[in-house]
Image: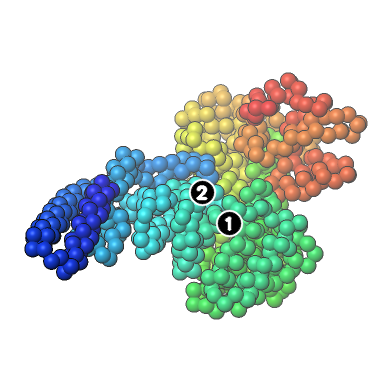
Amino acid sequence: MSTDYQEEINKLIKNKHNWQKRKSFIRDKLPKIDSPVKEFELHNEIEKCDDEINNIEQEIELLKKKNQQENQQIWQRLSQQMEDIPIIDKPIEGFIANKTTEPVVTPHWQDTVILLLSRLNHKVSQQENWETVTVDDAIKSLLRRDRLPEKARALAVFFLQYLAEEPNLKNETVNLVLKTAIKNIDEYDGRTIKPNTQMDNAFYKVMQSCFAKECYHQLLQGYIQSTGEIRKIIGVIFSYQIAATSEVLNKENANQKLNPLLEKLTTADLIEERVEAGLKLVDEFFRPHIYNLGARIDFLPDGLLPKVIKILLKVAQEDTAENNAVSSTTIWALGWLTSSRYCDNYTAYTFTEGELDFLRHFATNKKQDAFVRSFSVLILSVCTSEKPVFVQADWIYEWALVADGVKPQKQLPAPKQHLERLKDRVVLKHLISSDLPREAKHRVAIALGRIGYFTSEMIEPLLQIFRNNIFIPEQRDEALVYLVFIGGSQVIKALIDEANRPKNDSDQYDLPGRCFLALIGMGDIDALTKQLERGKVNKTDIDINALAYALAGNTNPQGRRVLEFIKKNYREKKIREAAAHALSRFTQWNSNNAKQISPNSSSNNEDKFFAQRGHLIHKLKAKDSTGKWAYYFVYVEPHKEQEFLKALNSDQSIDLEDYGKVVGSCYGEEPDDNLKALLKEKYGFEV
């Protein structure tokens, strides 16, 4: 019932009670009266009370009818609003380079519906048997209708946002809103520890509201009852509340933080308690990576790291529950502990052969959840003394050097296969050919690339990672490197198609530019020649010098024959000059027997490479070998960042070039104007 009607009826009811009390009082007096006149007067008073009570009851009924009529009108309007929900695509900000959108209701529709909901009755007590639609009735009816996925999600987000405003709702309605929101979670939700989508933000706000306890419980149940990537996403959303109230794991707080969770994980009776402890461990091991992509959790006090790993593996082995929620959580936690999502070998703990065999068995066990089966193969891919392929060289930088004519293509480093990983190869080959879900196959393909095994079954999963801006640049780069090593017509066609697309200013990753460098790195003669032909026909801004350099320095002499033909037969002066210059550079490479020479092309791919990686440029003040103060800007390869930071904090002198490349420097304790101008001109850096 609307507030106005409710207040008016409450006043009338109070007035009615007063008249009833007066009537009762008079009735009690009647037996004591012996005067006929007085008795007659009292009977008249009773009749007056009855008349007043009757009038008030009629007035109450009239107000109830008016309320019911208005209530029905509001409900009809609300139902009409729900028949055609206007949807707009709202950009998802924060974690994606390109603009990706999600469906949301329009602001006008949202304001209208909230206003209508505010005019409906709220909770009706059992004594108040009014035939009206309450807010709870409306929400239940609206959420239980079948809708297209886009509208169902937008509506679920709307009601979750409404819940965050703390309306007066029944518990069953609150739980229905939460369950509906969980049902409509998609792949863009829960991508990072911070809320990004409207769904993420709505859950986060509900966690700060009076419904936090209900939200926490429903997310926990949702995690336990779900499977696959949705289970993972729910787990990330569940951690929003943890992240808001806890400091990041470090050496000093590790025992205090981890030991109680390990105790709960191993001894709690309820599955909810054990899963909750496991999810908190996932969060503890994940959050250090937010602040440093190359973070290594190798700082745990003596004895704690092996204790944690052994407990996680033991719990995963012993969990025989039908939905395997506990084992899923422990393997997930182990994946973040070993930094397996990001590529570098994990040497802080040496896994026994028995422990590795368990991970292999877990990965192939169809009774386990697919998302953590694929996490177990990522763990296998980094638990080795050998460097994973992606970090054996700074591959894309190497391709940029070839594109600039700094070194011949034939001098590119070759990936080193992990020949001793025969058991892992067998497991991964089986999984890449299995019916695993798409997201799980992504991880399997990455794991295969890391151990240096390249097969055509990896191509589609790797292309999905590389093309999708939902992945961070480092993940897309890793997929691209493995695609280049797989090679073949399917990869070449995909790279050429993407390289030849018009440039999109919103594409901060520069997908066409990455594909162009990949073609340079692959060194396929036909592909490079076709791109040169495209530069001749379309007069585009394609870097023909880079293509010519790649042909000139190719292991296959056919590349130089192509350039000789172009030099003698092409009409286009620009392409003839590029071919001649590349052949001259080939002579220079051979005569000097030099691995690298300075580039002099007008298009400098090395500069573009550094410009796109400003987040990996470190600035520091230090004394050089002569004892003079100097200011440096240093590009540090991601997998060397931790080692670089440790070296900076030590008392020993270091060679900056061991960790990357100095892109700019000057003497003094601050960057001078010349250095600032150079960094701005070459890389677009504002200092």
The residue shown at (58%, 45%) is 473
Q: Which residue is mark 2?
A: 195
Q: Position of residue 209 (x, y in %)?
A: 47, 52
Q: Nearer the viewer, residue 140 or 579?
A: 140
Q: Which residue is mark 1?
A: 242
**Around disc 1, counting alpha carbons within 10 Å, would you say few (fewer than 14), some (14 to 19), or many (20 or more)?**
some
Task: Mark yes or no: residue 407 visible.
Answer: no
Q: Secondary structure at mark 2?
A: loop
The residue shown at (53%, 70%) is 272
Q: Nearer the viewer, mark 2 or mark 1?
A: 1
Q: Position of residue 608 (x, y in %)?
A: 62, 33
Q: What number of labels is visible? A: 2
Rendered image quadrant of residue 596: top right
Residue 260 got which mark? none
**Around disc 2, counting alpha carbons within 10 Å, would you say few (fewer than 14), some (14 to 19), or many (20 or more)?**
many
Q: Residue furthest top?
A: 673
The residue shown at (75%, 60%) is 300
The residue shown at (38%, 50%) is 162
Amino acid type assigned to the residue bearing label 1 in the image:
Ile
Q: Nearer the viewer, residue 200 or 411?
A: 200
Q: Position of residue 413 (x, y in %)?
A: 71, 48
Name which of mark 2 and mark 1 comes first in the sequence: 2
Q: Are marks 2 and 1 in contact (CB under 8 Å)?
A: no
Point out the image quarter for the C terminus: top right
Rendered image quadrant of residue 32: bottom left
Query: Disc 2 to disc 1, how far (Cα)?
Result: 13 Å
Amino acid type assigned to the residue bearing label 2 in the image:
Pro
Is residue 158 shown left or right of residue 221? Answer: left
Q: Nearer the viewer, residue 333 or 176?
A: 176
Q: Secondary structure at mark 1?
A: helix
Q: Position of residue 385 (x, y in %)?
A: 75, 62
